[in-house]
Image (cartoon, coloured by chain):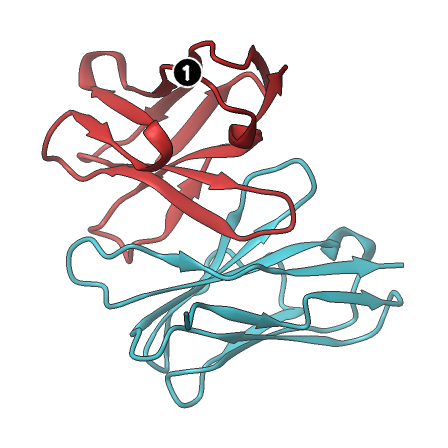
Amino acid sequence: AQSVTQLGSHVSVSEGALVLLRCNYSSSVPPYLFWYVQYPNQGLQLLLKYTSAATLVKGINGFEAEFKKSETSFHLTKPSAHMSDAAEYFCAVSDLNRDDKIIFGKGTRLHILP
Amino acid sequence: GAGVSQSPRYKVAKRGQDVALRCDPISGHVSLFWYQQALGQGPEFLTYFQNEAQLDKSGLPSDRFFAERPEGSVSTLKIQRTQQEDSAVYLCASSLDSSGYNEQFFGPGTRLTVL
């Protein structure tokens, strides 16, 4: 079975500082990995995805994530946080061999300090 | 733009009432998914349709939950005899098809509160 673990339900960083949101996955088959962002009262928006091509994936809004098979990790980073980055972030995994359903982590709420 | 829409956006029900939640996927999208997001949690898979066929309903928490997509477009998630533990945001997503990777596009969700 697939699963995702996000370390830290809340993360606070200062504006302009590095953002690092941690995600570890478990999968018995090569995974597809995603990061989604959810702003208050809005739907989920795809930030970036790993689909077995380049291990360093660049997404929208300056975010990127690196797939590390040896560490079973897919951490999300952004060099310089902006106030508008405050939101809930979900790491997720999918097995495209089984009907595409996405397994989400519990989420990390990112707070940006002025 | 024409994204995934859901209605109602908010629903308050008394315990024991039946509710119906509607999802309008992006036109032409073959696959449709329902997820349940409890407060402070990540979304959890409920069920999946490919056109009108319900191919996976393994995530439905009880037989009080029923989903349909009779014409392969609009889908309805019905919850009978609602309980307080059913309070959550119900998210719908659609994707172009199920061959290879296709991004799932999510609607804004329906927030259900059962009193």
Query: Is residue A96 placed above or below B95 in the rendered structure?
Result: above
Say whether residue B9 is visible: yes
Indicate the secondary structure of the residue bearing disc 1. loop
Please report the residue visible at 34 percent of the width from the left and 27 percent of the height from the top: A63
Residue B98 placement: quadrant: bottom left
Q: How many marks?
A: 1
Say whether residue A1 is visible: no
Task: State the residue in front, A18 or B71.
Answer: A18
Left or right, B94 with reference to A110 = left
Q: Which residue is mark 1?
A: A80
Query: Is residue B87 placed above or below B6 in the rendered structure?
Result: above
Residue A6, image x, y percentages: 47, 22
Please report the residue visible at 22 percent of the width from the left and 50 percent of the height from the top: A96
Chain in cyan, by letter, is B
Q: Which quarter shows the N terminus of chain A?
A: top left
Q: Which residue lies most toward the left here?
A: A53
Residue B22 placement: quadrant: bottom right
Amino acid beneath label 1: Ser
Chain in red, by letter, is A
Residue A35, image x, y percentages: 38, 35
Q: Which residue lies most toward the bottom here?
A: B71
Task: State the residue in front, B81 or A65.
Answer: A65
